[in-house]
Image (cartoon, helix red, strand yellow):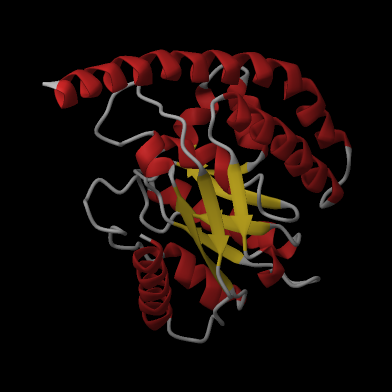
Amino acid sequence: MAAKKDNIFIEIFARIWAFWGLLSFTVTFLIIVIPSLATKLIPNPKGMYWFIKVSKFWVTFWLYMVGCPMKVVGKQNFKKGKTYIITYNHNALLDVPLSAPFVPGANQTIAKDSFAKVPIFGWFYARGSVLVNRKSLASRKKSYDLMKAALQQTFHMCIYPEGSRNKTNKPLAPFHDGAFKLAVDTQNEIMPSIIFGTKEAMPIHKTFYLLPKKLEIHFLPPIAAGTDADALKQQVFETMWNYYESRA
């Protein structure tokens, strides 16, 4: 009986906390939206570098407000003068504002174009993203070219190779090919990266739910692109799977 009451309390608290999370996210975003978009006046890659800096300040502050402080491990794996394709696991909507700001240096994220239609926030979202409509072959081809262009501008590219949030009870869902074909075509190394804690803070099967949890991003040693995209995909998948399980 006590356990049931505790569960009910957690369910109620998580909904109230989700409301606080949404409210604080909106208010703090409205404060930083103008300076963040003003970075478009600065030529790239410096403009994107400062956009990421502003984003990191905002997201870090907001995460403390909602009791989800972020710890970053493995930044030493980024070597000066090198540009990486960064692959993340994807467990929760909370992953979205985390992936780009904590990468050291200018970067963009491959992202659904639907979020770019949200009033005001869509401007910010589009600024840091390569947008794609996955249902459109033409959009997928265009986004692939834009990712190549981003890498040529020395932007790191952040990609969720699972494609969407992992709804299984396994560490990872199967990977799509895009990130690995991109790596082979451009010969940029892949940096496997694992986000911890968002699965517990915002469980995928719960609606409007948020709990205070410590979050972590672990950047792992980069993997050379090679010439075989399928072999590279398998290597990155196994690296991320094994690391996730070792930390569970």
From the viewer's side, name the closer residue of 174 and 43. Answer: 174
- In which quadrant of the rendered image does the C terminus lie? bottom left
Residue 215: x and y in percent read 51, 44
Residue 172: x and y in percent read 31, 59
Q: Quadrant of residue 209?
A: top left
Question: Is residue 43 rendered to the left or right of residue 70?
Answer: right
From the viewer's side, name the closer residue of 93 and 189. Answer: 93
> Residue at the front extreme?
2
Task: State whether residue 3 is above or below residue 72.
Answer: above
> Residue at the bottom extreme?
227
- Counting labels gives 0
Which residue is at a point 34% across and 63% down the rendered structure image?
175
Which residue is at a point 71% across and 36% down the rendered structure image?
55
Residue 154: x and y in percent read 75, 62
Task: State whether residue 120 is above or below residue 93.
Answer: above
> Residue at the right extreme?
42
Residue 137: x and y in percent read 39, 50
Which residue is at a point 55% across and 70% down the rendered structure image?
220
- In which quadrant of the rendered image does the N terminus lie? top left
From the viewer's side, name the closer residue of 40 and 35. Answer: 35
Which residue is at a point 72% across and 64% down the rendered structure image?
152
Question: Is residue 2 rendered to the left or right of residue 55?
Answer: left
